């Protein structure tokens, strides 16, 4: 080996090379330190995300429930259909209730591809929907309905679990700001549709 050769035992790197090596060590140390901080902080972030928006619609609870208990009219008020009218949709299962299913495929990254299926209902009270975004994960969405004076308070919610994914936990910090405006837009469109 070269370094076992006695001629190399007293070798000293020139000052310029020492400075370069020191700078490289500092850069590598900083990157490793930053990664450790990101991972450690990520471990303490919430492992779930929750988004919820509500609106009062001047329509009977039964009318709201019928509109939300299937996907055939979803695109009439969906905030994502407005973002990409060219999205391809497929409907399967019963027209309404548990098992009603819709899949979508869009090249618009704000719409993406996935599926949603009604998994539970309580007549005129609540509808739960399983969302599947493929490699991007899954979530549960729900519609909660309550009488409110001469109308109905509709709450549209979204819950997801990042299953320990640290990047997902950081992403979860932005969910409300990203998804909330879409939910507000969708509820406003639903309100306009049901109040006409």
Image (cartoon, grey):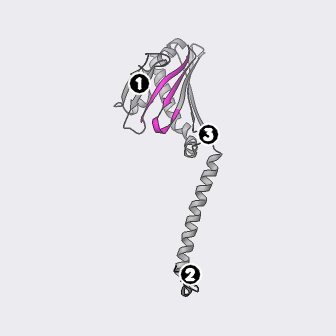
- SS at circle 2: loop
Q: Earlier in the sequence, mark 2 or mark 1?
A: 2
Marks 2 and 1, Cα distance to the nearest angstrom? 75 Å
Query: For the residue carrying disc 3, how many other residues have a C-alpha within 10 Å: few (<14), some (14-19), or many (20+)?
Result: some
Q: Earlier in the sequence, mark 1 or mark 3?
A: 3
* Majority SS type along the magenta span: strand
Give the extent of the magenta segment: 110-138
Judging by the rendered image, the residue that carries numbered circle 1 is 75
| Residue 60 on image: x %, y % | 53, 12
Judging by the rendered image, the residue that carries numbered circle 2 is 4
Query: For the residue carrying disc 2, how many other residues have a C-alpha within 10 Å: few (<14), some (14-19), or many (20+)?
Result: few
Choose mark 3 or mark 2, whichever is in front: 2
In the rendered image, the vertical position of residue 105 relative to residue 61, given as above or below = below
* 125 falls in the magenta region: yes
Which residue is painted at 48% across and 19% down in the image?
Answer: 99
* Residues tagged 1 and 3 counted as in contact (Cβ below 8 A): no
Choose mark 1 or mark 3, whichever is in front: 3
Marks 3 and 2, Cα distance to the nearest angstrom? 53 Å
Disc assigned to residue 192: none
Q: Residue 62 versus residue 113: which sits nearer the camera?
A: 113
Disc assigned to residue 47: 3
Choose mark 2 or mark 1, whichever is in front: 2
Marks 1 and 3, Cα distance to the nearest angstrom? 31 Å
């Amino acid at each position: 080996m070269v370094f076992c050769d006695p001629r190399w035992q007293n070798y000293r790197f020139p000052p310029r090379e020492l400075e370069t090596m020191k700078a490289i060590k500092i850069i590598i140390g900083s990157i490793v330190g930053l990664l450790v901080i990101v991972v450690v902080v990520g471990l303490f972030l919430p492992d779930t995300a929750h988004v919820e928006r509500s609106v009062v619609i001047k329509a009977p609870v039964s009318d709201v429930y019928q509109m939300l208990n299937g996907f055939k009219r979803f695109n009439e008020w969906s905030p994502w259909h407005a973002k990409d009218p060219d999205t391809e949709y497929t409907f399967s299962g019963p027209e309404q209730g548990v098992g009603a299913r819709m899949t979508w495929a869009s090249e618009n990254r704000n719409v993406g591809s996935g599926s949603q299926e009604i998994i539970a209902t309580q007549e005129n009270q609540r509808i739960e929907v399983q969302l599947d975004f493929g490699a991007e994960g899954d979530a549960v969405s729900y519609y909660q309905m309550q009488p409110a004076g001469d109308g109905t308070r509709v709450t549209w919610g979204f819950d997801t679990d990042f299953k320990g994914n640290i990047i997902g936990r950081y992403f979860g910090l932005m969910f409300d700001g990203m998804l909330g405006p879409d939910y507000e837009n969708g509820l406003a469109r639903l309100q306009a549709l049901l109040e006409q």
